[in-house]
Amino acid sequence: MPSQLASQASQASQGSRPASPPAATPDRRRRTPGLERFNTAPAGAAETTLLACCGSRRWAQRLVAHRPYPDLDALLAAADEASYDLSPADLCEALADESSAGVHPGAPQAAHTALGAAHAAYESRFGHAFVICLDGYHPEEYLDQVLAGIRARLGHEPDEERAVSAEQLRGLARSRLAHVVANHPESDVAGASR
């Protein structure tokens, strides 16, 4: 049981994750095998799984401490609440754990160049990777959404951008967590960047 959870966490944190798959959420009121594994896993394994979803230790420890969750909705509500309560230091820790999303390896070189330049400009201005939750978009829209998001957000003041980044990170963590716990270890449990 813990090895399956660790495997899901490992897949969730591997490499750059350009975007989350469109939300294909299971019946959230039902206990899924993934939720059962999460609820009964040793605290360390559960925390590792959560850290693959959001890099804040306090966020992960808080969710582990409140187990068991009766259903996916309860877990996601707790994740949202913990996200809203991140201190500035917790947010810095979580953002430091993210990495800039890349494009599909088969994309044209121009796409790689444009995205690399946009990420460099963003990271230079704000000191952390660009995060964006792409739930609801199709994979062929990801590059345009990321580039448009970076362009729009480069004009933000640092405090405004931290608030936007915190909200995007909350969405990413929620999406990643739903996919891991919904027992989708084969999917790229992403959001945007990691």
Image (cartoon, helix red, strand yellow):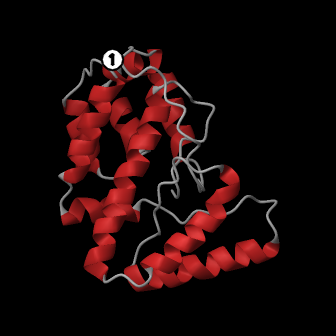
In the image: residue 160, left or right of residue 13: left
Q: Tell me the quarter of the picture where residue 2 sits.
A: top left
* Residue 145 image-quadrant placement: bottom right
Q: Is residue 146 left or right of residue 166?
A: right
| Most foreground residue, 55 or 84 | 84
Binning the other alpha carbons within 10 Å of mark 1 as few (below 14), some (14 to 19) or many (20 upward) gives some
Is residue 54 something one can see in this rendering? no
Q: Nearer the viewer, residue 171 or 45?
A: 171
Give the percent coordinates (x, y) of residue 49. Answer: 41, 36
Report helix, strand or loop for mark 1: helix
- The residue indicated by pointer 1 is 40
What residue do we see at 45% from left, 60% from top? 98
Vertical arrangement, residue 164 with respect to residue 127, above or below: above
Residue 5 can be seen, yes or no: yes
Give the image location of residue 59, x and y in percent.
25, 46
The residue under label 1 is which amino acid type? Thr
User: Which quadrant would residue 106 be assigned to in this image?
Assistant: bottom right
- The residue positioned 57% from the left and 52% from the top of the image is 19
Q: Does residue 173 appear to the left or right of 145 in the view shown?
A: left
Task: Identify the residue at horizontal 19%, vertical 31% (top origin).
Answer: 65
Vertical arrangement, residue 1 with respect to residue 132, above or below: above
**Residue closest to the eye, 92 or 78:** 78
Residue 131 picture location, percent across and down: 45, 63
The number of numbered discs placed on residues in the rendered structure image is 1
Residue 151 in the image, given as x and y percentages of width and height: 52, 79
Residue 149 vertical position relative to residue 1 in the rendered view, above or below: below
Which residue appears at 68% of the width and 79% of the height?
A: 114
